[in-house]
Structure formats: structure tokens, C-alpha cells
Image (tube, helix red, strand yellow):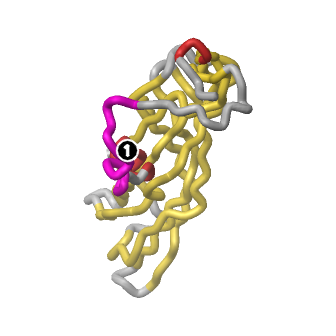
Amino acid sequence: MSGTEKDLQCRELIAKAVCGKGHKFTQTTHVIIPSHTPSTILGCWIINTNFQAEKVGDAVEVSGTYDVNLWFSFANNTQTEVKRETVDFSVFVPLSFFDKNSRGDLEIVAHAIEQPKCVRAELTSGGEVRVKVESEFAVEVIGETKVCVVVCSSCDDKEFAFEVEDFESDEEFGDFESADLLDNDLN
């Protein structure tokens, strides 16, 4: 017994799926005011990054804090100190796509593709230090959505064949990597 077109039905399934995603690279400058006027900047690094994400309109806001650690010398390079300052940040990540038909509570997932890092620290004439920070975030919005699937009338039909006219063989998909799709969406 083989399946025919009259045996086929379409069904709508409710499934949890990625209903939206986005990606953003950011550069931010912070001004740090040390307790002593620096002679030389010896190093600057970012640690203790914490963030959360929420959907705001057509974007996802990633907000949180990190610690800027500035190591510097003062008193004509005779003493050193590390100034630690906790900094708030907020990044609006636009969604490259979003299924407005998604339903239910949305789950927002954010990943730091590039953790916040100091790429430049420079002294100003007033004894302040400008710290340039780069970071990169990717977000996904997960929700319930409808998926339409073709089903046959009987699961016992072992000889059911479904023909696709557009593809001649499975060889066309031999080098297909689903992970490449994600990489391309993020660029």
C-alpha cells in the first residue's frame, strides 16, 4: 500500500522556536578619575561582566555592569595603584528578523560574542583617563509559533514515498552545514 495525495493532510503544530535574532558590535568610552594624577597608564582590563536582556519594541536591550580596573603610576612614576570602578552599560540590539505571530511568553537569550574589553586607555590633560571598551552581543527571542506539517493518514504505511520535484539527489546537500547559517545571520 502506498500513500497518495488524498491521504495527505496538513496540520498546524505549536512549537517553541527562535522567533527573532539580532547582533551588535559596540564601542563605548568611559572617563575614569583616579585618586592621584597618573604619570603613566600601566594597564587596563575589564572583569566581572554581568548582564541581562529584555525585549524593548523592535530591539533587545542588553544591560548590565562590569568592573574597569585601571593600573597606573603616579608621583613621577614612583608609586602605583589600581583604580577599580564599576560601570553600567546598555546596548540596544536590533532584531534582524522577528516573527510577530509568535505567541506566549517570550524568552530572551543574550550571549557575549566578544566580552567587554579595553582596547585603549589614554591620559587627558586634566588627570582623567579615557577608557575605550569594545564588546559584541548576539540575542535570540524564543517563543511559541505555528509550524505547518504534512502528515499521512496512517503511520503503518511503510511504503509511503514523498517526491520533491525541485531536487534531483541528496548530493546537493552533501556540504550543507546548519551552523554556517547561524554564522551568516550574525554578520
Q: Residue at x 51, y 72 (%)?
A: 82
Residue 67 appears in the picture as rendered:
yes
Residue 17 relative to residue 35: left or right: right
The percent position of residue 56, horizontal first and vertical second, equals: 53, 23
Q: Is residue 25 visible?
A: no
Say if 137 sits above or below 156 in the image. below
In the rendered image, the quadrant that contains the N terminus is: top right
Nearer to the camera, 137 or 99: 99
Quadrant assignment, res 94: top left
Image-based side of 37 in relation to 64, left or right: left
**Most foreground residue, 34 or 1:** 1
Residue 136 placement (x, y as % from top left): 41, 50
> Dividing the picture into quarters, in which one does residue 109 lie?
top right
Q: Main secondary structure of the magenta part?
A: loop
For label 1, the residue is 186
Residue 180 position, x and y percent, is 38, 51
On the image, the x and y values in percent for residue 126 come to 31, 57
Observer-nearest of 122 and 141? 141
- 76 vs 161, left or right, is left
Q: Residue at the spot x=61%, y=41% of the render?
A: 52
In the image, is residue 20 part of the stretch drawn in magenta? no
Name which residue type carries label 1: Leu
Q: Give the residues in magenta.
A: 164-175
172 inside magenta stretch = yes
> In the displayed structure, would residue 178 be above or below residue 72?
above
Dot 1 falls on a residue whose secondary structure is: helix
Q: Residue furthest left?
A: 125
Front in this rendered view, residue 59 or 161:
161
